Image (spheres, rainbow, N blue to C red):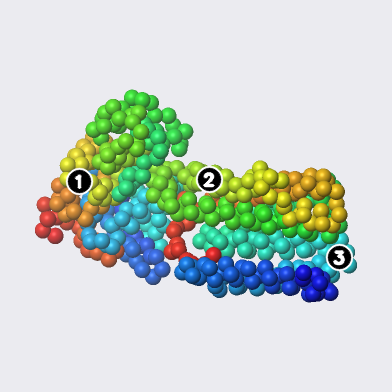
Amino acid sequence: MLKHLFSSHIALGFAQAGIAAALALVVLFLARRRQIHLESEIVIALVRGITQISAVGFILLLLLKGPQWTAIIMLSVMMVVAASISSRRVKSIPGAYEVSLYGIVTGAGIVITLMTLAGVIDWAITSLIPVGSMLIANSMNSNSLALERFRSEVTGNVGQIEAALSLGASASNTVNPYVQNAFRASLIPALDNLKSLGIVWIPGLMAGMLLSGSPPIYAAIYQFVVIAMIFSASSITCLVSTTLVRKRAFSTNDQLVLRPVPATRSL
Amino acid sequence: MPDSHTPVLRTEHLTRLVGSTPLVNDVNVAVVRGEIMAICGPSGAGKSSFLRLMNRLDEPTSGTCFLDGMDYRQLAPRELRRRIGLVLQTPFLFPGTVADNLRFGPSQRSEMVPDSVVAHLLLQVGLTGFASRPVTELSGGEAQRVSVARTLANSPEILLLDEPTSALDDTAKRTVEAVIVDVVRANKLTCLIVTHDISQAARLADRAMLMRAGRLERIVAAQEITHA
């Protein structure tokens, strides 16, 4: 119906975005009736989302006309921003930004580089940036889950950790179980995606490929390729970040510095 | 009985600030070998904070502590914590059996603890036959005695006890008190015990440090504790 009302793709896109946002505002209204006040967070998130993704669309439009190497700059900027967003969730962890940056750059960076060199990801900007951004975004989500889980496990077990420290245990030994739990928890979404692929959900990339006329079998297999790459990038990211973060929880004299902080309402 | 000539532990202007709030403020004290020193004072006096500084779970903002004449900052924290054992207010036993807990400290240095040593440690705290018992099946008093034995397994020279009987009923409290005196004397340990219970301090200690608002107000002999 909307297609008949709008002649340009941009106008049509904004109209569709407006309807999707209106649905989110209905959810906001329902939450408000249950005394759950998320107004400012949701409105800011919606405005940020549409602004950011529109900007990316315009930048992509410019990049498509530019040299190939600009994709590297674009992906690098994405990783820096992803690390910043991820680290904001765990401000109480000293050096959370550096840990997130090293994790995401290593995890997403290795997979993007190897897969591009192997020809699994097309070197064309129109392929490299969307697929690369998916890997970076999922690495960011897994990193956030890993660090948040680590923080909550450590701050919830201060007594056990200090009991072990007081008996002469090394700092890293005292948090080993919590590092393992954090790593396992961070991979749950990526693992569930792999398990449910094609049964519970048909991912957006496959839908996009089908819409653009790719053969269904190839679109399906390539979706598996992308999900498997996401799993690898997320795993490497979390391996690196959980390895680095354990040291950040302690001072150089093996004293626990990661402590509980008062809960806040922000999402 | 204490050897009054040999200070084994001495603090020098020991201070810990959090922000601008002093938790421990310029404390100077010498504890002699074999002595039981009680640390008394109201809530917020800095008793537990002082004990944490001794075990170096927290870092002094200024001042330091000397162990056998050596600045404790020159010792690796793990070695210091083996030599100055800390028993926390809550036992925080690790999952597994009583024996697993007793073996924890030495295992951090790749040292084996034979069954005979485990049995001897349990004998000292009055828990003979408890080695294979899961820690989930222990009462509060038993758990605290396992916590004492777990610290003793590291062969410390100094034993720090942070209100070890505060969560126990009277019967369990008296049992743990007897265990503390026995193990300190039998192992020729020096002991610092935090307590808010003046009568407990009088029963257990040779001397008592009286603290208020992070400061050491004075040190009194055992017979004067109840009058302080």
Nearer-the-camera pick, A165 or A135 = A135
Numbered disc 2: what chain? A
Could you tell me residue A201's position as x and y percent? 68, 50
Q: Which amino acid does label 2 sit on?
A: Asn
Category of crowding for the residue at label 3, using alpha-carbon neighbours closer than 10 angstroms: few (below 14), some (14–19), many (at least 20): some
**Residue at horizontal 31 percent and vertical 55 percent from the top:** B48
Numbered disc 3: what chain? A
- Could you tell whether A29 is left or right of A221 in the image? left
Q: Do labels 1 and 3 share a chain?
A: no
Category of crowding for the residue at label 2, using alpha-carbon neighbours closer than 10 angstroms: few (below 14), some (14–19), many (at least 20): some
Q: Which is closer to the viewer, label 1 or label 3? A: 3
Q: In which quarter of the image is residue A62?
A: bottom right
Residue at the spot of label 1: B169
Under tag 1, what secondary structure? loop
A262 lies above or below A121: below
Q: In which quarter of the image is the C terminus of chain B?
A: bottom left
Kindly indicate whether the residue at mark 3 contacts the one at mark 1 (C-beta within 8 angstroms): no
> What label does residue A64 carry, if any?
3
- Could you tell whether A174 is left or right of B138 in the image? right
Q: Tell me the CA gap for discs 1 and 2.
A: 36 Å
Q: Which amino acid does label 1 sit on?
A: Asp
- Could you tell whether B147 is left or right of A224 in the image? left
Category of crowding for the residue at label 1, using alpha-carbon neighbours closer than 10 angstroms: few (below 14), some (14–19), many (at least 20): few
Could you tell me residue A152's position as x and y percent? 48, 54
Would residue B30 be visible to someone looking at this image? yes
Residue at the spot of label 2: A181
**Residue at horizontal 43 percent and vertical 47 percent from the top:** A161
Under tag 3, what secondary structure? loop
Q: Tell me the CA gap for discs 3 and 2.
A: 42 Å
Q: Earlier in the sequence, mark 3 or mark 2?
A: 3
Q: Which amino acid does label 3 sit on?
A: Leu
